[in-house]
């Protein structure tokens, strides 16, 4: 796979988004946003979009959590691990996500629906890989890339 620059993926100043890129046996998510928080939210949306179509689903509950981590890498993995945990343990899928930076971490709001209420379109995530994980500022805001084990 040839890496493409941020501009070729739709990443432009002031925009947010995500895309799935080919990866052997797993799922690779690239996400971007004007801020770290927007980038993290797009990473969640990308991961969810790799296995479920939530476009018609309605949230049945809201989960609020605080993630206190030392690094942006830790925040990204902790947030995505939380989504995997909610799916595995509670059968919940985020249909929307919000994040706000707080001193030392991140306040997150996950609006979730039951897995039975969404259209499953791919293999469910089992974990987040640290291999080739990246998150940080770029010329357009923030971007990240992460491999999801399925």
Image (cartoon, grey):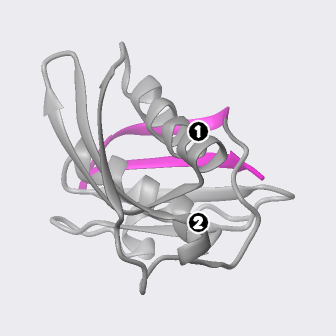
Between 66 and 132, the one nearer to me in the picture: 66
For disc 1, the marked residue is 85
Picture quadrant of residue 116: bottom right
Which mark is in front, 1 or 2? 2
For the point 44% across and 74% down, the residue is: 8
How far apart marks 1 and 2 lie (CA) works out to 13 Å
User: Are the residues tagged 1 and 2 within 8 Å (C-beta)?
Assistant: no
The magenta segment is 129-150
Disc 1 crowd rating (10 Å Cα; few below 14, some 14-19, many 20+) is: some
Between 60 and 15, the one nearer to me in the picture: 60
For the point 25% across and 53% down, the residue is: 38
For the point 51% across and 45% down, the residue is: 83
User: Residue 13, percent across and down?
Assistant: 18, 65
Q: Is residue 144 magenta?
A: yes
Quadrant into which the N terminus falls: bottom right
Q: Is residue 48 magenta?
A: no
Q: In the displayed structure, would residue 137 be above or below residue 140?
A: above
> For the residue labelled by badge 1, is the local secondary structure a helix, a strand or a loop?
helix
Residue 24 relative to residue 45: left or right: right
For the point 16% across and 33% down, the residue is: 101
């Amino acid at each position: 796979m040839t890496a493409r620059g941020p501009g070729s993926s739709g990443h432009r100043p002031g925009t947010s988004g995500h895309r799935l890129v080919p990866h052997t046996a797993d799922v690779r998510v690239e996400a971007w946003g004007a801020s770290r928080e927007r980038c993290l939210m797009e990473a969640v949306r990308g991961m969810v979009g790799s296995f479920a179509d939530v476009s018609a689903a309605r949230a049945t509950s809201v989960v609020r959590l605080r993630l206190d981590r030392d690094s942006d890498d830790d925040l990204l993995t902790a947030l995505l691990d939380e989504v995997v945990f909610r799916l595995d343990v509670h059968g919940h899928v985020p249909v929307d996500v919000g994040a706000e930076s707080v001193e030392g971490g991140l306040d997150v709001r996950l609006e979730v629906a039951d897995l039975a209420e969404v259209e499953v379109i791919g293999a469910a995530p089992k974990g987040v890989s640290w291999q080739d994980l990246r998150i940080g500022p770029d010329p357009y805001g923030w971007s990240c890339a992460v491999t999801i084990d399925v």
